[in-house]
Image: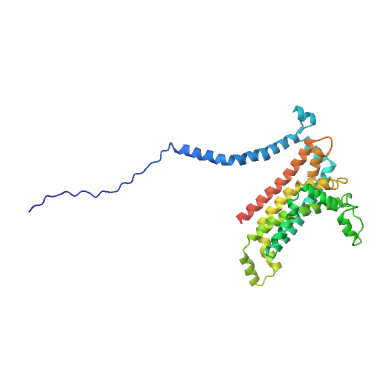
Amino acid sequence: MNLPLTRRSAPATDTVAVTVPDPRRRPSRLQGSRWIAFGFAAPLIAYLLVFYAYPLVRSIDLSIHDYTIRAFVQGNAEFVGFDNYIAVFSDPLFGKALANTAVFVLVSLVFQYAIGLALAVFFRSNFPLSGVLRALFLVPWLLPLIVSGSVWAWMLNSDSGIVNAFLSAFGIGQINWLTSPETSMIAVIIANIWLGIPFNLVILYSGLQNIPAEVYEAASLDGAGQWRQFWNITFPLLRPVSAITLLLGLVYTLKVVDIIWIMTAGGPASSSTTLAIWSYREAFGTGQPAMSPAAAVGNVLIIIALIFGFLYLRMQRRQENT
């Protein structure tokens, strides 16, 4: 019996539809994402322009013009170029203010960092009431600076200050902390150290929390004591945190005005006048504001801070490359 031959059909193969993106739609998507990114960045850009770029440009403009009260009102300040900077650098007070600034910043940073690091290491080992004590150490940081300056001015008062009363109990005579050229700088440095310790404590304590406890356990098993653990483990591993702490402390200390102005107003005989105090006094401390020289002195402080900032960035790059 002959069966009819049937033709076998080829097995059906699954076909996958490949969608080719339309190149004309890609730019619109990219533009949309760019607008979204710009929308998120717009508040930050506006903040930087209003609070950083504009004041900096305005400060430069003030320093290269001769602004008086009439010039502020009429808006026709005379362009003088670098005359204000030349006047500042040739002023006999510049060398003294620069030296006072260096002493004030260097001594403050050394003691703030050393005491803050010692307290951070002390609080690293948890013990009862450690949290309460850490909170109490933050009080100087939380107080308004006008309150802190007034309290220190009262404590260091020559006649009724508690510091002289305490020293007299040990047979030490009266010290004119705020009215003597020999001790006025010491007085404002002590107050500034007291104000800066909490900042160093908080930052360095946070850095210590990132050091693994296993490193200390291994060192103790190898026979390393507390002092050797500090120099060989704690201090080296804290270098990045220490660098940024010192940099921020330097920038803050360079521009300290309020505590010095409240306690000594830069005196007596300019013995506690720093560059920041000099700038403030030129602008607001006299009955005749001299905004242009004040801006020139302020720009010198900005340049000093930028130099140390670039040095920090260079050191950080070297550490990353090694």
The number of numbered badges drawn on the structure is 0
**150 or 71: nearer the eye?**
150
Is 219 located above or below residue 103 in the figure?
below
Task: Report x, y in % for residue 124.
Answer: 68, 63
Task: Report x, y in % for residue 92.
Answer: 85, 42
Q: Residue at x 80, y 44 (%)?
A: 277
Q: Residue furthest left?
A: 1
Is 200 located above or below residue 125 in the figure?
above
Q: Residue at x 67, y 56 (%)?
A: 241
Name which quarter of the figure residue 25 lies in.
top left
Is 37 located above or below residue 215 in the figure?
above
| Quarter placement of the N terminus | bottom left
**285 or 162: nearer the eye?**
162
Q: Is residue 129 left or right of residue 275?
A: left
Q: Is residue 155 left or right of residue 322?
A: right
Task: Report x, y in % for residue 251.
Answer: 72, 48
Whether residue 187 can be seen here: yes
| Quarter placement of the C terminus | bottom right
Name which quarter of the figure residue 121 lies in.
bottom right
Q: Is residue 110 left or right of residue 4?
A: right
Whether residue 77 can be seen here: no
Name which quarter of the figure residue 26 lies in.
top left
**142 or 222: nearer the eye?**
142
Is 33 located above or below residue 3 in the figure?
above
- Tell me, what colour scheme is on the image? rainbow
Task: Report x, y in % for residue 81.
Answer: 75, 33
**163 or 71: nearer the eye?**
163
